[in-house]
Amino acid sequence: MTTILQISDTHIVPEGALVSGRLDTAEALARLITRIQTIRDEIGPIDAVLVSGDLSDDGSPTSYDRFKTLMARLNLPLLVIPGNHDAREPMRVAFAYQLPAQGRLNWDTQIGEMTVIGLDTLAEGSGKGVLSAQSLSFLKATLAKTKTAPTLVALHHPPFPSGIKFMDDIGLTNRDAFRAIVADHKGPLRIVCGHIHSMMVMDIGGHIAISAPSPCSTFAYDVRGGAPVGFMTLEDGCVLHRWNAGFQSVRIGPVAGAGPFPF
């Protein structure tokens, strides 16, 4: 059995700063980490933590240092991919132990029984995401190597429309190219992403794709064309992805309710 814990969109900033003058994202992440630590025995062993982009809100080296300090409490291998708020070169330096020394920040690694593929969708200077020709070729070649092994593919921008217009306006611009590659893959595959600060599930080329919530905020699911643009201050949790002769994905909420009560 192999278990990956996915956290997304932490949006950490240097100490003393607030995101949008309102959100203390470091405290929100610290609360989620405390929650995870509290239930470690309940949820079982975790093999690695995957953070699916927007680790930082401003791409500063200081924010990445602060992020790593916060995440160190989990004492788990840390896998990261960039989001639209990240900056490629500062991120490369901060996570030099994991990320490639040049080019796009694409990678693959073996975690237990599972191959994990990280894809770089960052288009710096734009909130939109794009999978470069290099990234698409990397994905195709790596999937060809995994064959029938269980594989988790991570990218920041969802490879599907969310229905939230202002987020889809800064979505993945070449979703069809991604879909064409994964549709050809016959082995067990789960696709995970972030960006939209909420959990959604969709079929992409015959495979399940899941977006993770954010510990610091969310976006209202409002599909009206003139829906207000902005975030909600609701803090959310993370997602546990487990391979045990099949994929299982479980949302871990940010708090526990009262109980358990007998029924």
Image (cartoon, rainbow, N blue to C red):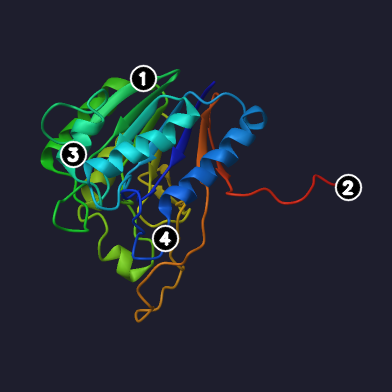
Q: Residue drawn 28% across and 46% down?
A: 179
How far apart in space, not on screen, are marks 1 and 3 (Cα)?
A: 25 Å
The nearer-to-camera label among 1 and 4 is 4
SS label for mark 3: helix
Tell me if 42 is positioned left or right of 8 in this view: right
Residue labelled with disc 1: 110
How far apart in space, not on screen, are marks 1 and 2 (Cα)?
A: 42 Å
Q: Position of residue 91 (x, y in %)?
A: 22, 38
How far apart in space, not on screen, are marks 4 and 3 (Cα)?
A: 23 Å
| Picture layout, residue 249 above or below residue 128 | above
Callout 1 touching callout 4 (CB < 8 Å): no
* Residue 226 shows up from this direction: yes
Residue labelled with disc 4: 23
Label number found at residue 94: none
- Classed neighbour count for the residue bearing mark 4: other residues with Cα under 10 Å, few (<14), some (14–19), many (≥20): some
Callout 2 touching callout 4 (CB < 8 Å): no
Q: Residue drawn 57% across and 23% down?
A: 45
How far apart in space, not on screen, are marks 2 and 3 (Cα)?
A: 53 Å
Amino acid type of the residue tagged 3 in the rendering: Pro
Residue labelled with disc 2: 263
The nearer-to-camera label among 2 and 4 is 4
- Considering only order in the chain, which callout, 4 or 1, is on the residue closer to the N terminus? 4
Q: Nearer the viewer, residue 251 or 145?
A: 251
Amino acid type of the residue tagged 1 in the rendering: Gln
